[in-house]
Image: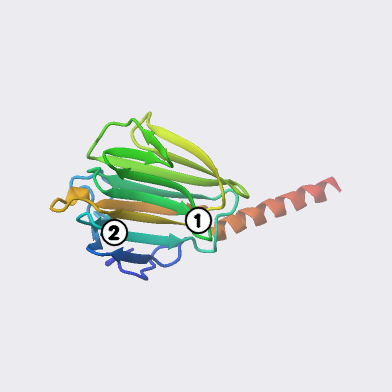
């Protein structure tokens, strides 16, 4: 859906426009995660790439809100991250409509940090992290972060998910493997589809009641 990735870009569906902002030396690009030596999260040979270096407050941030507001119960947000080198800070933050952080996954200082819990996972240059955040209650969000088979973390936090921010910064310079790639993001089902599901359920219940009458 994209030929360029700039602030205000809004291709695809299920989300509002991108809010891209930087601090210092940082930026955004479209490119192949696989071709740069990361895990393969490409779609038609490209993914969303970000960089921010060297250390000293150089950051790239990519925020996006969901179309139609916060998730409804029964909806999920999914996204893939490709991470190689573990210097600096890079990862994702999930937040509510007031931009209060509900969950984060950060890679830095040679560690994988999931909401304050450091995982004992070994380093792998081709790591692909899959995030599934499901609104299981009006104010209850379940987040599953997984990498390779047998490596996953599930956390349930309070709040209603309204958007996400991917970020990378303060990394070493001079090597593309310090970057961050994201891709394959979706809201499932999308708001319009969820409405149709609800309408279908209502019609089915009315039909059952009519038969019983």
Q: Position of residue 18 (x, y in %)?
A: 38, 65
Per the rendering, the mark at residue 59 is 2
Near mark 2 (Cα within 10 A), the count class, few <14, some 14-19 or many ≥20, is many
Q: CA distance from mark 2 to mark 1?
A: 20 Å
Please, which colouring scheme is shown? rainbow
Q: Position of residue 69 (x, y in %)?
A: 54, 62
Q: Residue at x 49, y 60 (%)?
A: 66
Report the side of 100 relative to 170 (left or right): right
Q: Residue at x 27, y 58 (%)?
A: 57
Inspect this view and state whether residue 40 appears.
Answer: yes
The answer to which quarter of the image holds residue 3 is: bottom left
Q: Position of residue 24 (x, y in %)?
A: 25, 64
Q: Which quadrant is the N terminus positioned in?
A: bottom left
Inspect this view and state whether residue 43 appears.
Answer: no
Report the side of 19 relative to 155 (left or right): left
Q: Which residue, as the protein is rendered here, is positioned at the far front?
A: 56
Q: Which residue, as the protein is rendered here, is positioned at the far bottom?
A: 8
Is residue 79 depicted above or below 123 in this figure? Answer: below
Is residue 203 depicted above or below 3 in this figure? Answer: above
Near mark 1 (Cα within 10 A), the count class, few <14, some 14-19 or many ≥20, is few
Q: Position of residue 201 (x, y in %)?
A: 68, 51
Report the side of 179 relative to 186 (left or right): left
Q: Which residue is tagged 1? A: 100
């Amino acid at each position: 859906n994209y030929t360029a990735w700039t602030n205000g870009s809004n291709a695809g569906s299920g989300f509002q426009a991108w809010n891209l902002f930087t601090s210092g030396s940082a930026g955004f690009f479209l490119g192949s995660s696989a071709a740069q030596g990361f895990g393969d999260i490409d779609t038609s040979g490209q993914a969303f790439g970000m960089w921010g270096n060297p250390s000293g407050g150089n950051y790239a941030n990519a925020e996006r809100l969901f179309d139609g507001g916060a998730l409804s119960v029964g909806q999920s947000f999914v996204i893939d991250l490709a991470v190689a080198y573990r210097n600096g800070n890079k990862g994702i933050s999930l937040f509510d409509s007031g931009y209060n952080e509900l969950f984060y996954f950060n890679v830095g200082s040679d560690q994988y940090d999931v909401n304050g819990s450091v995982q004992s996972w070994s380093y792998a240059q081709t790591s692909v992290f899959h995030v599934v955040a499901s609104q299981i209650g009006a104010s209850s969000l379940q987040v599953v972060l997984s990498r390779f088979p047998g490596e996953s973390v599930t956390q349930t936090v309070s709040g209603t998910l309204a958007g996400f921010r991917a970020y990378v910064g303060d990394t070493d310079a001079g090597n593309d493997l310090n970057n961050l790639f994201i891709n394959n993001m979706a809201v499932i089902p999308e708001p319009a589809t969820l409405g149709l599901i609800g309408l279908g359920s209502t019609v089915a219940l009315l039909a059952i009641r009519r038969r019983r009458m």
